[in-house]
Structures are given as C-alpha cells and as structure tokens.
Amino acid sequence: MGNYNYLSINWETYMTTNMQTQRFLDFVNANAMEQLVCTPTRCQNILDIVLTNIGSTAPHPRVMSSLVRLYHKSVSFEINVMVEPPLNPKTIKIFFQGKLPSIK
C-alpha cells in the first residue's frame, strides 16, 4: 500500500503512456497483482494503491474524507491473515529471570 502518485496509470485497463510508470506496471502484471483502490483519492486521480495477488477474496478498501488533509482522501482496509502454529513447539528458557545460585 502507498501513495505512489502514478497519475498516468489507467487502473481500469492497467495501461500508461509513461515509460517509467510502465516499469511499475510490468512488475504488477508479472506478479499477477490487482489494484484494489477504485475511487479517486485526490481530485479525480487514484494516487493511493493497495495491491494484492489473492484476487477477489481480498476485502476492498474504503476511501474516506481525511481528517488532516482536505484535498487528499484517506484509504482504509483490513488484512485477514491465518497463521498456523509451529508443528514442534520449542521451550525457551529465560535464564536472566532465574535465580542463579539455585541453577548451579
């Protein structure tokens, strides 16, 4: 996610006329990424980008009026991450909290 200021990107077609911006789009396309922000975030431009490669299962961000900047809107989104516990849990001894005389 970020404010990239790629004004020349048409996010409906993933096309640009700017060669420097084309390198960024090549990266996005090579990694099968999708831009989720569809609403302008400053004037009529989409400057804030949220990219994903998990497709339609990603929650779409909300574009809201900013409390700080009147000319630039805020983007809010959630990330749901599933983390699997390790297969072999390890015991970690914290010696600095122990009583050294009883350890010896």
Image (cartoon, helix red, strand yellow):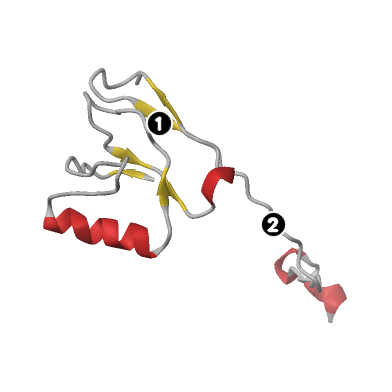
Residue 60 % position (x, y): 50, 35
Q: Quadrant of residue 90?
A: bottom right
Evaluate if marks 2 and 1 touch, with contact meaning CB atoms under 8 Å apart.
Answer: no
Q: How many marks?
A: 2
Label disc, if present, on residue 1 of the rendered structure? none
**Could you tell me the amino acid type at mark 2?**
Val
Residue 79 horizontal side relative to residue 11, left or right? right
Q: Nearer the viewer, residue 84 or 63?
A: 63
Helix, strand or loop at mark 1: strand
Q: Quadrant of residue 22?
A: bottom left
Residue 60 horizontal side relative to residue 84, left or right? left
Q: Could you tell which of marks 2 and 1 lies nearer the N-terminus?
A: 1
Residue beneath disc 1: 75
Please tell me whether residue 26 is drawn above or below residue 46 in the rendered image.
below
Residue beneath disc 2: 83
x 43%, y 40%: residue: 36
**Could you tell me the amino acid type at mark 1?**
Val
The quarter of the picture where the C terminus appears is bottom right
Please tell me whether residue 24 is drawn above or below residue 4 in the rendered image.
below
Q: How far apart are marks 2 and 1 (CA)?
A: 25 Å
Q: Which of 27 and 77 is in front in this view?
A: 27
x 32%, y 38%: residue: 48
